[in-house]
């Protein structure tokens, strides 16, 4: 039984393990230039379509400067495109490139494989309990 005093350590170890799994899986598929931190940006663009930088920050729970850095790297590797908003030229709109769209099936497969690895050996209902408890803990820090 895990010691509750070690929960932050355990969560950190879990995050490092999932990042390593994602990084290795991406490399095995020959997908370069995408890091685990890019996943939430790519996912939101896949689900929502084109978004402003501000919307990406809000939807991902990241600061605008953090989103700017992540998007800049994705643009550099050709996974997203940035353009000026048609009505307000001060605003940038981000969208998935054809390159990213062509990888959607591979990225979804990697995501599914990671969740399968994460929940391997869980009993019925334990996945939901874990998810609910982690969300509850995050809410204690005002972040969802």
Image (cartoon, rainbow, N blue to C red):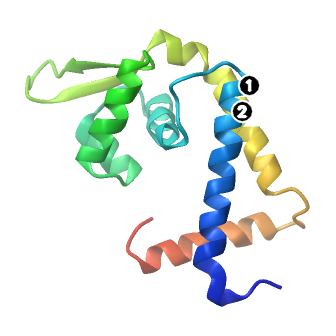
Residue at the top extreme, as displayed = 98
- Residue closest to the eye, 64 or 32: 32
Q: Quadrant of the C terminus?
A: bottom left
How far apart are the two marked residues, 1 and 2, measured between alpha carbons?
Answer: 5 Å
Q: Which picture quadrant has residue 49?
A: top left
Label 1–label 2 contact, CB within 8 A = yes
Residue 134, placed above or below residue 76: below
Q: Residues within 10 Å of mark 1 (few under 14, many from 20)?
A: few
Q: Position of residue 108 (x, y in %)?
A: 67, 31
Tag of residue 138 = none
Q: Is residue 133 visible?
A: no
Q: Residue at x 65, y 83 (%)?
A: 6
Q: Position of residue 34 (x, y in %)?
A: 52, 30
- Which residue is denoted by mark 2 in the rendering? 25
Q: Which residue is drawn at 23% across and 18% down?
A: 83
In the image, taking residue 5 as reference, residue 57 lies left or right, namely left
- Which residue is denoted by mark 1 in the rendering? 28
Q: Position of residue 96 (x, y in %)?
A: 43, 20
Q: Which picture quadrant has residue 126?
A: bottom right
- Residue closest to the eye, 136 or 106: 106
Give the SS element for disc 1.
Answer: helix
In the image, taking residue 10 as reference, residue 53 lies left or right, namely left
Q: Where is residue 68 in the image (x, y as percent from the top left)?
A: 27, 37
Give the SS element for disc 2.
Answer: helix
- Residue closest to the eye, 34 or 41: 34
Residue 97, placed above or below residue 106: above
Q: Which residue is drawn at 37% across and 19% down?
A: 76
Q: Residue at x 81, y 50 (%)?
A: 117
Residue 144, placed above or below residue 133: above
In the image, taking residue 13 as reference, residue 2 lies left or right, namely right
């Amino acid at each position: 039984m895990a010691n509750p005093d070690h929960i932050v350590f355990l969560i950190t170890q879990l995050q490092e393990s999932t990042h390593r799994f994602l990084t290795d899986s991406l490399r095995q598929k020959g997908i370069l230039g995408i890091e685990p931190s890019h996943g939430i940006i790519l996912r939101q663009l896949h689900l929502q379509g084109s978004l402003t930088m501000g919307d990406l920050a809000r939807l991902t729970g990241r600061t605008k400067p953090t989103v700017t850095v992540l998007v800049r790297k994705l643009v550099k590797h050709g996974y997203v495109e940035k353009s000026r908003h048609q009505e307000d030229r001060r605003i940038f709109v981000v969208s998935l490139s054809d390159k990213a769209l062509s990888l959607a099936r591979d990225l979804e497969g990697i995501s599914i494989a990671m969740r399968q690895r994460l929940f391997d050996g869980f009993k019925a209902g334990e996945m939901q309990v874990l998810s609910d408890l982690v969300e509850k803990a995050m809410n204690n820090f005002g972040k969802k």
